[in-house]
Structures are given as C-alpha cells and as structure tokens.
Image (cartoon, rainbow, N blue to C red):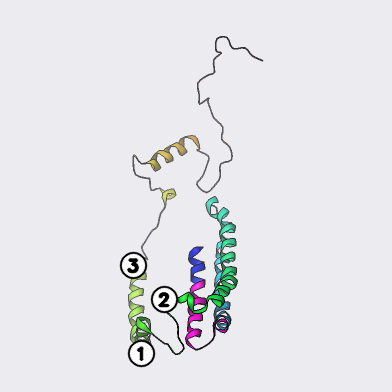
Amino acid sequence: MIGAGTDYGLFLVFRARENLRDGLDKREAVVQAVARVGESITFSGLTVIAALLSLLAASFGIYSTSASPLAIAIGIMLIAGLTLLPAVLAILGRAVFWPSKPRPGQRKTGAWGTLARFASCTAPRVLSIGVVLFGALALGTLGLQVRGRSKGIAPPAGSDSAAGTTAQARYFRRCRPTRRCWSTRWARRSGPTPRRWPGASSS
C-alpha cells in the first residue's frame, strides 16, 4: 500500500518539477502535472484495486479476507495522491525539493538520459540482445516444477512445522488446507476425569 502511494506520488512530483524548470509558477506547475499524469495514476490504481478484488475468489481465507481492506487502502492512497499531494505542492512550491531548487531553464539528463540515448540510438542491437538473453532465461523455466507443502513435500524433521503438520493430521483429519474447519468432535475426553473434592457441596 505504501509502495503504491509512493509510486503515484513520484509521478506527480517529478512532473511538477519539470514544469517548474520550464518556467511555470508553482500553482500552474501542479495543475499541468495533474493534467498530464492524473489519468495514468488513476488507471494504474484502478488496475491494482481490480487485481486485489479478484482475491475474493481465492480458496485460502487469508487471501480472500484481505482483498477488500487492501483494495480500500489503495483507493484511499489514490485519492490522497490526486488531492492532498497537489495541495502540498501548490502551497510549498520549490521548497518541496530542498536542498535543490528547480530553476527555469535548468535541465539535467544524467545517467538515465545517457542510458536512454544509447538504447534509442542502437535500438536493433539492444532489442536483439534482450530477446536472446531473456528468451534463454525463459527457456530455463520450461522444466521447472513448483510444488508446495500440500503437494507431498514434508517439512524438515524436528521443526515446528513438522510438529504442527503431525498434530493437524492427528486431530483434524477431515480438514483440508483450502477448507476451514468450523468444528471438531473429540473421540475421548482430553483432560482428567473430574473428581469431587472433600467438603464440596453441589447446588
């Protein structure tokens, strides 16, 4: 949730800084920033919310019960990124970027600009290398078999997981990892038989 909110904020803050470097005043810089990236941020947040709501169909309770709270939290972060953050930027202006001060006409590409220039100028070569490299990595996963604990891999002997698995198999035989156990019936009394204490009276 915090990562998503930070991601949305970075889009807006960096766009506002570019507008300040183009000579716009602080309020107009924020308006132009929201106009440019507001739609992208909104659709990005809605995509994450839709993905989280799909967890409602999950069979594991920990996933299905956390779907709605997480989706609501992302929605709140999205609203805050489109309202509260622009208000802070409009009030503080260049002070947000202290100790650096964006000035009109100030442009600096840095290492990212150099990397982008290299990738664009040698696009066919970069594309070919990328296809070969990532294609080879993808081919390495063709024979990969991913199995969890429920597929027959036992936990390490002597560990707490092994003790828990043994207890579950002994006392909850009818339960499955993807199904909740609402009740259980004990075949025998688990505690000692109650005895009458000397001098005790029944009411």
Rate crowding at label 3 as few (under 14), some (14 to 19) or many (20 or more) other CA atoms within 10 Å: few
Q: Is residue 21 magenta?
A: yes
How would you classify the magenta stretch by its main secondary structure? Answer: helix
Q: Secondary structure at mark 1?
A: helix
Q: Secondary structure at mark 3?
A: loop
Front: mark 3 or 1: 1
Above or below, comparing residue 103 to residue 73 in the picture = below
Query: Residue at left 41%, top 78%?
Result: 100
- Depth check, front residue: 80 or 63: 80
Front: mark 1 or 2: 2
Q: In the figure, residue 162 lies in which quadrant?
A: top left
Task: Name, please, the residue furthest toward the top.
Answer: 199
Image spot of residue 86 (x, y percent):
57, 75
Image spot of residue 90 (x, y percent):
56, 77
Magenta segment: 8-28
Could you tell me the amino acid type at mark 2?
Answer: Pro
Residue 140: image tag: 3
Q: Earlier in the sequence, mark 3 or mark 2?
A: 2
Q: In the figure, residue 166 lies in which quadrant?
A: top left
Q: Earlier in the sequence, mark 1 or mark 2?
A: 2
Q: Is residue 163 magenta?
A: no
Could you tell me the amino acid type at mark 1?
Answer: Cys
Residue 99: image tag: 2
Q: Secondary structure at mark 2?
A: loop
Distance between mark 3 and mark 1 Cα atoms: 31 Å
Residue 121: image tag: 1
